[in-house]
Image (cartoon, rainbow, N blue to C red):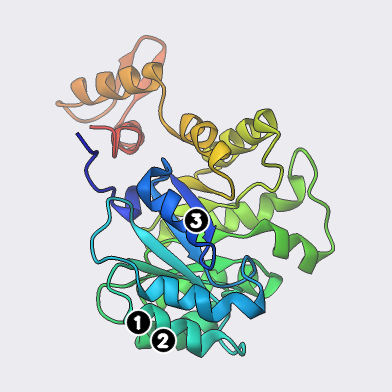
Amino acid sequence: MPKPPVRADLARVFLYIPAHDERKVAKALAGSGADALILDLEDGVPPSEREKARRQVTAQPPQSHTPILVRVNAVGSQAHAADLAAVCAARGVKGVVLAKADAAGVRALAPLLPEGLGLWPLIESAAGIASLPSLPNGPPLAGLLLGAGDLLADLGARWTRDELPLLHARSQLVLTASACGIPAIDTPDAEFRDLELLAERSMRARDLGFAGKAAIHPAQLDVIRSAFMPGEDEIRWARGVLANAAGGGAWTSGSEVQDAATVRRARRILEGVE
């Protein structure tokens, strides 16, 4: 029996697919294992293949078990208008990932999107990070994504194993997403063959408050999912908290004091699981 459609706002694993590559697109739609697909019209597509990529986006069927998002080139770029036209003509697309996004780009793009098409700013520049505090007062968003490769290049920083240069950007993204009531999705990891490193970085992102992580290769999907899905001990703990919360106030459970904040944490753990 096929699994039911996954809501994009509860997706944990996002897979980027270059939209011009028909084989990869077809394979991903047939069952990649991702919770959401991002068909790429930006950096993953050679300029000579962009028209073909846009046709692929427009041709997507209206129903898919996996939500389809499309990454479009930045507002003000030469390719942006044609990308947007392809997305608006598509019937099977659930959202737009805006590359090189900042608050000004979000304000410019949001009024142009058809109703029901979610806007996912991809924050990958110093200007994008600096503009994050203004997003909660702007147009409604479906989620926020981080793009570390372009951000680190913009900052002149290195992508170290501990990812310390990304800590401020990640924390700011999670804070903004939380203030907006939307999920924050972590950057894809370019080291797609080092699954041990991917697991380490995925768990770090989850500990910081990210709801999920993007991938650039199907081999990364199971590792990311495992890192972001709550374990049996966490689920058991969360269920116990909710079972003991009927009286309100604060109470003790073993060596832990629990209260309303604990209940909120427990509900977040179980969200999308039950």
The label on residue 85 is 2
Q: Are marks 1 and 3 in contact (CB under 8 Å)?
A: no
Q: Residue at x 32, y 76 (%)?
A: 90
Identify the amino acid type marked 1.
Cys
Query: Which residue is at the front of the view, 229 or 208?
Result: 229
Report which quarter residue 178 is drawn in. bottom left
Q: Which residue is mark 3?
A: 23
Instruction: Relative to 173, say whether 45 is above or below.
Output: below
Mark 2 and mark 1 residues within 8 Å of each other at the beta carbon: yes
Residue 167 vs 145, above or below: the answer is: above
Residue 50, percent from left and from top: 57, 78
> Which badge, 1 or 3, is on the more N-terminal residue?
3
139 is higher (above) or lower (below) than 219: below
Residue 81 visible in rendering? yes
Mark 3 against mark 2, which lies toward the viewer? Answer: 3
**Location of residue 69 by image quarter:** bottom left
Q: Amino acid at mark 3?
A: Arg
Image coordinates for residue 254, horizontal then vertical, percent? 36, 9
Which three-letter amino acid code belongs to the residue tagged 2?
Answer: Ala
Categorize mark 2 by other alpha carbons within 10 Å: few (<14), some (14-19), many (20+).
some
Residue placed most toward the observer, 62 or 232? 62
Q: From the viewer's perspective, tell me whether residue 95 is left or right of residue 105.
A: left
Q: Which residue is mark 1?
A: 88
